[in-house]
Image: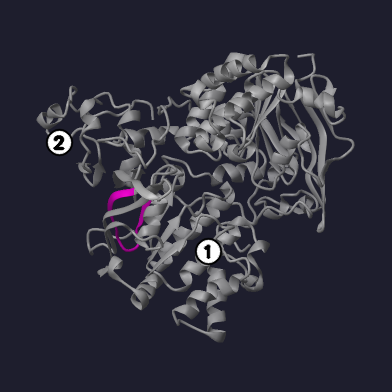
Amino acid sequence: MTSEPLLSVNSLRVYFNTPEGIARAVDGVSFTVAAGETVGLVGESGCGKSVTALSLLRLVPPPGRIESGSSIRFNGKDLALLPTEELRQLRGNRLAMIFQEPMTALNPVLTVGDQVAEVVRVHTKASRSEAWARAVKMLAQVGIPDPSERAKQYPHELSGGMRQRVMIAMALILEPQLVIADEPTTALDVTIQAQILELLRDMRDRTGLALLLITHDLGVVAEMASRVIVMYAGEVVEEAPVHALFENPSHPYTEGLLAAIPRLGEEAARLKTIRGTVPPPTAWPSGCRFHDRCPYAFDRCANEAPMLLQVASGHRARCHLIEEPERRVRGVEATASVLS
Amino acid sequence: MPNSASASPLLTVSNLAKHFPIRTGVFRRVTGQVKAVDGVSFTVNAGETLALVGESGCGKTTTGRALLRLIEPTGGSVEFDGVNVLSLKGEALRRLRRRMQIVFQDPYGSLNPRMTIGAAIREGLIVHKLAEGAAANTRVRSLLEEVGLRPEYATRYPHEFSGGQRQRVGIARALAVEPRFIVCDEPVSALDVSVQAQVVNLLQDLQRDRGLAYLFIAHDLAVVAHMADRVAVMYLGRIVEMAPRASLFAMPLMPYTQALLSAVPVPDPRIKRQRLLLAGEPPSPANPPSGCVFHPRCPHPAKDAACSVIVPPLEEKEPGHFVACIKQTPTRVDWDVQRAAGGSIPPERYLPRAQ
């Protein structure tokens, strides 16, 4: 493909000034999302994935700031540099976001119908009644029963699954090219989660939208994404097509993460763990940020930060082992009680 | 692994109920009941783990708290080690609390922010007069080590720890008084995957080393598959299926359990699950459906009018495997009885093909 990808993030850095020092929450992250593609951004708490998502729409709360040198190109325009008014025109329209906690993301004093209709009124010249009609139609499309009645209700009158559907309606009503979904199903029960994922898949098939799905749940990623980016300590540590990531995880963190997931249908063996804990963003370790938790760490790792190296086509990992595969030998086994 | 057939159960819960009154109007008259827990019965043997699973609002957390009397039950009975728990008062109840402990879900809310973690763990020892002074401090240090925390952390405050570490503190606190039984109320739900794995392993190690029994309350079926000896599935305040772990996961017989299992995302992109999508949402426990509480959403092919009339009994359909469904064979609810209640389709054994 010769044209530029829909979204192209380059060297994104988001820092926060805190009393304990500068928290480098996102520290040089680059990735792309092509039109129509579903990319999974995975990582655990403290890896910087949510801040990455918020920064795409410049929603990072102060004292966080996007550092200069960061570039977020969407449809050829750099969102990091766009004047606020132009950015506002894009948000909700070409680029939309679905948040994790629908109760806190929805306005409690407006009806859900008004909130969906508001998106239409802000970006188009539709009248009040036209916008309301479109909102009701959208609520039906996202599977809310009795939409014309429900539209008159307030968020607290709806269940968690319903509220999430309302958020999806708000995000998709103007058929954006890119939807950023930040843990859209984490707060929901598993059967409702299945419904919401099915809904996202339907909408994706229908409108051809690109989806950046941020989650810690690798099961959701396996189901929804065609490409996966793994973050750790503010950096991208691995990126790969979804099958390659699960079949050939190349970064020891990804390997550890996959091994730690309890799976249905497997005998009650002991869960494999990653020893230690996630470091704080005010004090990333020297060299490779994962070295103090890595079962394969060797001398180079504490001193030299690895670059993202090619494993296979479309598959890269930030690890010295890519260059020195013979070093992939487990050192201290992480089986004994994990003193942290 | 205990031989559950040998001794009598450590804990026996019979027809436990917890109803919350709904008060409306200026005079706050009781106009209805939220039947959060509506007739729950189960046993837990020494050293074993019974998992209680279900989605939000099914009553599992209320059940766990009610049997410990953190919430007072409105009906039923609880017998622990031969003692009638619901009849105890004052000092006797406090002594029982030594043996029945709880680990909470929220590692951020369940520790007093003004107490050092050492003080939090020590509190139980003091209250139950198990140790004091230097001896108590030694116990605290050894408990911290046992849960994988450095003993010198005893002087730190909860806010200085991560979620996983706080959860370990909660476990140490529960262990301090040497209980025989611990209600683990969603102990790993708020934790990341790698941290979750550490805490699950810890709970299993402690169970093995100390012979603990657990009531493990969770909504994550994959974690349950690792921890549990037996599993009970709850829906709208009732147990709808109860079976040994292997039996439940290999052959779920209650349509709700089947849907629940099929909804769990599998971390393997090669597996394209045929989802059993449940339509709609769980109804309100203030207004449960008549007959089988699951019938409005049930995909069983033999579902008919009888399902909205007859409350299905929990029946043993396979050895040790109990299911509340009049349509899943075998059933002691006669076809005549079903027809009299408006039934039109005879019961049949339904197992969805794609699992």
Position of A92 with respect to A87 (left or right) is: left
Chain hosting mark 1: B
- Quarter assignment of residue A251: top right
User: Residue at label 2?
Assistant: B333
Quarter of the picture holding the C terminus of chain B: top left
Q: How many marks?
A: 2
Q: Tell me the element at label 1.
A: helix
Element marked by disc 2: loop
The amino acid pointed to by label 2 is Val
Q: Is residue A224 above or below residue B146?
A: above
Horizontal arrangement in the rendering, residue B212 relative to residue A337 (left or right) = left
Are the two marked residues, 2 and 1, in contact with CB atoms closer than 8 angstroms?
no
Crowding at dot 1, Cα within 10 Å, few <14 / some 14-19 / many 20+, comes out as many
Say the numbered circle drawn on residue B170: 1
Q: Chain of mark 2?
A: B
Image coordinates of residue B153 in percent, x first then y, are 64, 70
Q: Nearer the viewer, residue A187 or B284?
A: B284
Q: Is residue B228 left or right of residue A39?
A: left
At 43% across and 24% down in the image, what residue appears? B274
In the foreground, A217 or B85: B85
Image spot of residue B1 (x, y percent): 34, 58
Where is residue B233, by image quadrant? top left
Residue A195 in sight here? yes
At 75% from the left and 49% from the top, the residue drawn is A289
- Residue B148 in the image: state x and y as whole percent: 57, 64
- From the viewer's perspective, is the residue at label 2 or at label 1 nearer? 2
Residue A96 left/right relative to B137: right
Q: Which residues are magenta?
A: B37-51
